[in-house]
Image (cartoon, grey):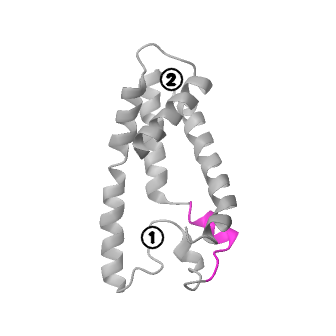
Amino acid sequence: MVWAVLAGILLLAANMMIGQVEGVNFKKIFSVVAWSSLVSVLAIVLATYITLSKGTAYGVGTDLSPLIGAPPIGEPKSILYRLVSKLDIMTFWQLILWTFGLSVMYKVTAKKAAVPVVTLWIIWVVVSVALGGVFEKFGF
């Protein structure tokens, strides 16, 4: 379900920012999103290894949040912590794969294909950081 929503949003953004191209449809963009999601498998393996090595899952991740330290359990997360937690190497890898996928599908340069991908990611970061404090109060 999440892949379908992501593929639909990515297709809409790419068609608006790059322009519609014959032969590019939801099914093709869905395959780009689905195959690039295999990066998550590697992220899970890596996080599991770090968790087992450390002895706890607290503060483990592939993002930059462990560099500033996780807030104590039950304490609200700061805006800086929520922002830094979005800077994830696996997410960047996935965004690069989306960019190359769009570049091939739309037959454009990677730079032009990166525009909708980076734009959507920036919107996601701003919204999730801004609303993170609101949803945190409800236990999300």
Local secondary structure at mark 2: loop
Residue 30 is left or right of residue 73, and the answer is left
Give the residue displayed 42% in from the left and 33% down from the top.
101
Position in image of residue 72 (x %, y %): 57, 86
Answer with the quarter of the image where residue 71 lies.
Answer: bottom right
Local secondary structure at mark 1: loop
Circle 1 packing at 10 Å, graded few (<14), some (14-19), many (20+), is some
Quadrant where the C terminus is found in the figure: bottom right
Residue 49 is left or right of residue 81, and the answer is left
Circle 2 packing at 10 Å, graded few (<14), some (14-19), many (20+), is some
Give, as a three-letter code, the residue at label 1. Answer: Gly
Quadrant where the N terminus is found in the figure: top left
Q: Label 1: which residue? A: 61
Give the residue displayed 67% in from the left and 65% down from the top.
134
- Image: magenta residue range: 75-86
Give the residue displayed 53% in from the left and 17% down from the top.
20
Position in image of residue 13 (x %, y %): 57, 31
Q: Label 2: which residue? A: 108
Decide whether residue 136 is among the magenta residues: no
